[in-house]
Amino acid sequence: IGLLVLLILLRRSPGAPGAPGDHAAALLRLFIYGLLLDGLVMTVEGAIDVLETAIGDSAPEGDESDILALGLALLCEGGPTFGLLLRHVTGTLRGSPAERTSAAWTLFLDAALFISLLYTMVGAFEALDDLIGPDDFEVVSLVAPLVWGAAWALHWFRLLRVFGASSDLHLATGSATGLVALGIGSGGLLGELLRRGYVEVTDLSGAEPALREWAIVAALGAVVWAWYWWREYRSAPRSDAWYVHVLLVGALGGMGATIVASATGLYDVLVWAIGDRGGAPADEHFEWLPASVGVLAVGAASWAYHRWVIGRDEPDVRTGPMRVYDYLVAAAGLVASIVALSVGIVAVIEGVTPEPRGVD
């Protein structure tokens, strides 16, 4: 890797990017940014392994040396690669405005921000779960979110603010990540709260619910969604990526969750009313109904909010993503109607058909 970095630095000077029509220069640019991303991941993972080994004491003694050796190897390879290439890339970006609008730079920045954001959220989830959980809190759980968070902050507050990006794809992916986490966490939290009430009423025995996990996911999703969407993307210029996020991810995704949850709950009710219950009592048969209600509520809220955003800002404008959304909504409605009719017919047939003899 060091030899490749040296050859690249000798091949191109910081202020002389390849011409837009030069395919060799474009391939070289992609190669450079690919190595830069690889160096970033190696450096961060190596730093995490070294710090966790130095701070923590939960790993077996034999595993500690292996993890430390792996971390040092990643740091020795990834650190110089990332440092030298980052210096080369920033020099090129300062000397060439055309480099800042290149597809390679945009893709690298989007990928680096998304990967670092995702791993920061995963690490923060584990740290918060350890903090508020029943077990003793271990400081080592803070290493991963802090290191990945520092990587995200470097790209957001330094590289993005100084050199910019030619697209808003990083805002769309970040907003979608926060929205999905917020929806999953909120739906799971509401469903778990309803299930707890249902258990109190029916005395249904089961596993201990993981209420705090859903609450942590919802909180992390709310923070990310508020930062990316509410602070940055909500009032941004209306691009294709913006419409795709609002219409296809927010509105259509919420509608899909609403349809699936309502169909699942309706199916349980129909099977209980006129179908084959399988001998299960009511408390067991409707055990998953609270989860369906939680998903239904969150999906409907996402659907209504994003449709309201479109109707408030541009009620008379029909763009390509809006047309695609209308077609997909019509197709989803048709499929849902066919499925509902089929399920209803099957439930009626099962309810009126006598059970064959000899079948337990």
Image (tube, rainbow, N blue to C red):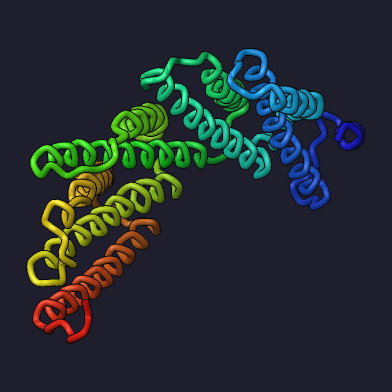
Q: Is residue 156 above or below residue 34?
A: above
Quadrant in the picture for residue 111: top right
Q: Residue at x 66, y 34 (%)?
A: 100
Q: Is residue 331 visible?
A: yes
Lateral position of residue 89 relative to residue 254, left or right: right
Residue nearest the observer in this picture, 78 or 24 = 78
Residue farthest along the bottom direction in this orientation: 357
Query: Residue 210, image x and y in percent?
Result: 32, 34
Q: Is residue 80 above or below residue 102?
A: above
Q: Residue at x 62, y 39 (%)?
A: 106
Quadrant in the picture for residue 30: top right
Quadrant in the picture for residue 109: top right
Residue nearest the observer in this picture, 137 or 71 = 137
Residue nearest the observer in this picture, 201 or 257 = 201
Query: Residue 168, image x and y in percent?
Result: 50, 39
Q: Quadrant of the N terminus?
A: top right
Query: Residue 223, image x and y in percent?
Result: 37, 26
Q: Residue at x 54, y 36 (%)?
A: 114
Q: Residue at x 80, y 42 (%)?
A: 18
